Image (cartoon, helix red, strand yellow):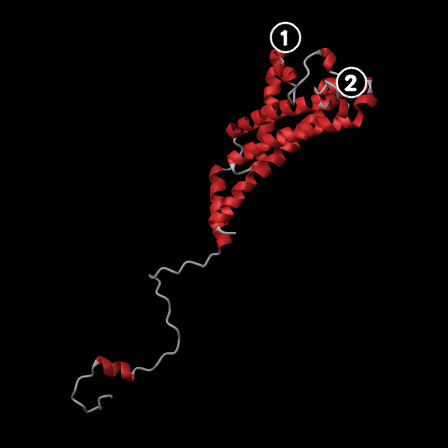
């Protein structure tokens, strides 16, 4: 109902709304009203959380890698003892030490041969896989880097003990007495081509095993994140 032009009654707000033309255009959003957050899936949330955690706690952890190196050294000693005990079957006898194995291979290749080399490679690989797994499981992130850190610990300890043995005598070459890997030959008679090639091969195999072990150690935490934060 609208007021006539000659109607003395005042125009009310209801009359104004009734006479106002209808606008079908959508209302513009209020700039002061906060926008609704975008919808995110469970995968996006998990990726964001893990990315923030990795940025904060990722990287190479030498503290955890030290315990990985201890694990690798202990596993090497145990597995070497098993190989030495089964020497008659694998052709190594009591010479599970890398330098002694290389010398025996040069003197009697038919006795040691390919089986002894494979057994030695398996011992080194499994030992450092265990060490890398422990470091990767403890550090949670950057599993390959934790494996490299385990390998660096082994290299640093081998260099330090080799220097000590060269200065104080071979009786201080602890790694040689333990048949642990890797170690650096410090006697002139040990610097044969076979020993050098064996040491290089051991270094490569141990590095690969440690890196793969570190990556495997991270998988447990990935499963935990999937359960807690969604797939």
Label 2 secondary element = helix
Residue nearest the observer in this picture, 207 or 87: 87
Please tell me the numbered disc located at residue 169: 1
Q: Is residue 48 visible?
A: no
Q: Residue at x 61, y 11 (%)?
A: 172
Identify the disc placed on residue 126. Answer: none
Instruction: Look at the image and tell me in which quarter the N terminus lies.
Output: bottom left
Q: Position of residue 109 (x, y in %)?
A: 82, 22
- Which residue is at 47% across, 56% downward? 40
Secondary structure of the residue carrying tag 1 is loop
* Tag 2 residue: 104
Residue 162: which quarter of the image? Answer: top right
Instruction: Classify mark 1: residues with Cα within 10 Å, few (<14), some (14-19) or many (20+).
Output: few
Query: How far from the left and from the top, in percent, is residue 112?
Result: 79, 23
Left or right of residue 188, residue 147 in this image: left
Badge 2 or badge 1: first in the primary sequence = 2
């Amino acid at each position: 109902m609208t007021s006539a032009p000659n109607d003395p009654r005042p125009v009310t707000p209801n009359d104004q709304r009734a006479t106002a033309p209808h606008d079908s255009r959508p209302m513009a959003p209020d700039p002061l009203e906060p926008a609704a957050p975008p919808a995110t899936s469970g995968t996006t949330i998990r990726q964001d959380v893990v990315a923030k955690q990795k940025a904060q706690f990722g990287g190479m952890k030498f503290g955890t890698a030290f315990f990985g190196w201890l694990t690798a050294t202990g596993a090497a000693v145990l597995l070497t003892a098993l190989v030495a005990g089964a020497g008659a079957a694998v052709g190594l006898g009591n010479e599970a030490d890398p330098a002694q194995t290389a010398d025996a291979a040069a003197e009697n290749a038919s006795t040691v041969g390919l089986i002894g080399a494979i057994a030695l490679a398996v011992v080194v690989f499994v030992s450092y896989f265990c060490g890398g797994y422990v470091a990767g499981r403890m550090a949670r992130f950057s599993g390959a880097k934790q494996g490299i850190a385990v390998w660096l610990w082994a290299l640093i300890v081998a260099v330090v003990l080799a220097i000590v043995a060269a200065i104080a005598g071979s009786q201080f070459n602890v790694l040689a007495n333990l048949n642990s890997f890797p170690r650096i030959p410090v006697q002139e008679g040990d610097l044969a081509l076979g020993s050098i090639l064996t040491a290089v091969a051991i270094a490569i195999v141990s590095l690969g095993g440690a890196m793969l072990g570190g990556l495997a150690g991270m998988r447990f935490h990935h499963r935990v994140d999937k359960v807690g934060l969604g797939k």
